[in-house]
Amino acid sequence: MEIGLVGKPNVGKSTLYEASTLAGAEIANYPFTTIKANHGMGFIRGRCPHLDLNVTCSPRNAKCIDGVRYIPVELLDVAGLVPDAHCGKGLGNQFLDDLRQAHALVHVVDVSGSTDLEGNPVELCGHDPFDDVDFLTNEIDHWFLGIINKDWHRISKQCESQHEKVERLLHEKLTGLGITLHHITDALQKLDLQIKPTKWTDDQMLEFASSLRKHSKPMIIAANKADAATDEMIKEFVSKVKDHDVIPTCAEAELALRRASNADLIEYRPGDPDFKMIDASRLNLAQTKALGRIEEILDRFGSTNVLTVLEKAAYDLLDQITIYPVEDENKYTDKDGRVLPDVHLMRQGSTARDVAYRVHTDLGEHFIKAIDCRTHRAISSDHEINDGDVIKIHSNA
């Protein structure tokens, strides 16, 4: 699963990316700091089953801190998008191409209004951040439309002359964008187009491209630089955004907290509503003042919300749940004796056989049964798993 961080230049995408990954992305106060996409591993939180099973876990792929699992997700920080990017302006072609395999998008917006539409610094409130939401969705819609239009004459003719389904032919063309047949079917059903594909108007084509974008690249808004905006500014922005959830974020504060924690200046668990000083005497005056300002931010927003926006993307937009496969259903261990070693994110509605395939193809192909380790009951291949399930797979592989 890959989450793309998108938006115009200079809104804090790379700051949010580094705050999530500590990967050392280049950050500066001018447009197009990010030239090539940054790929890294961020983390979202989940409840560790060891709290319920009365065992001590020994994680392998996701750190556990006080019963909170930090589960890895792939993040993609792409070059900033400017108006007419779908025509090649700025780094538009590169930006859009980088987005092909993203499953969901976090649109990072400067809610303080201190950057114009192309990412140049302006005075506070000098730009309406809602304009950024409008232009970005429009750019992606036209990018989709351009790809569809390249072969639309052949596809629409083939649908009618050979009685082929438009969904199947479009899927063959769009699979490189990470678009599934299910996405295309849902997008078409929402529009309820009854006329022949060869008769679709330009407006209908754009409407289909927009519907396809909503289904295949669902989006959430990170209203970044929220600490520089008033409550009234944030409230007004949220009231204008109709189609997406909005989460106020303070990426700079999260990055500062992560760096201070790594330097053993504070105790801070990512995503928490507060932090604790370790030794105030080690802090210089500037650091003390900065942490004081961050305390005010945490009091105001409850947290920096950097993890919150990623979690909303994974759990709400993409319907992900957590699954813990093990080899010993009584000790909850793998073959090396590690307790609850791995956690996997899977789509809501996944089955026990899907879990088997996720662990190894052979387990899925030679599936016999699975065991729900919490209840110790056998479950069938088509049994839908639940969030936090601990599963043992039996197979004849």
Image (tube, helix red, strand yellow):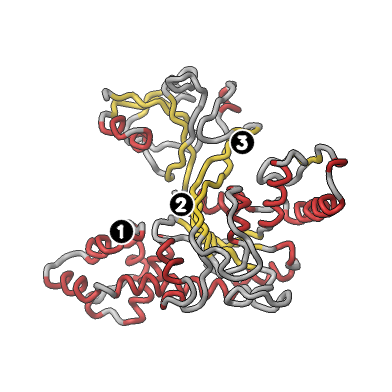
Q: Disc 3 designates what residue?
A: 68
User: Gap between marks 2 and 1, in whole Å?
Assistant: 16 Å
First in sequence, mark 3 or 2: give its number. Answer: 2
Secondary structure under badge 3? Answer: strand
Q: Residue at x 30, y 82 (%)?
A: 201
Q: Residue at x 69, y 69 (%)?
A: 112
Q: Is residue 344 left or right of residue 32?
A: left
User: Gap between marks 3 and 2, in whole Å?
Assistant: 22 Å
Q: Amino acid at mark 3?
A: Val
Q: Residue 158: x percent and y percent?
A: 16, 70
First in sequence, mark 3 or 1: give its number. Answer: 3
Q: Residue at x 50, y 61 (%)?
A: 78
Q: Amino acid at mark 1?
A: Thr
| In the rendered image, the vertical position of residue 214 relative to residue 366, given as above or below | below
First in sequence, mark 2 or 1: give its number. Answer: 2
Q: Quadrant of residue 34?
A: bottom right
Sort mark 2 into few (<14), some (14-19) or many (20+) by Cα contacts within 10 Å.
Answer: some
| Residue, far left | 162
* Camera-side mark, 3 or 2: 2
Q: Residue 12: x percent and y percent?
A: 62, 62
Q: Is residue 4 left or right of residue 47?
A: left
Q: Disc 1 designates what residue?
A: 175
Q: Disc 2 designates what residue?
A: 2
Q: Residue 8: x percent and y percent?
A: 56, 70
Q: Residue at x 63, y 53 (%)?
A: 306
| In the rendered image, the vertical position of residue 196 relative to residue 323, given as above or below | below
Q: Mark 3–mark 1 contact, CB under 8 Å?
A: no
Q: Nearer the viewer, residue 391 or 122?
A: 122
Q: Residue 393: x percent and y percent?
A: 36, 26
User: Gap between marks 3 and 1, in whole Å?
Assistant: 36 Å
Q: Nearer the viewer, residue 12 or 108?
A: 12
Secondary structure under badge 2? Answer: strand
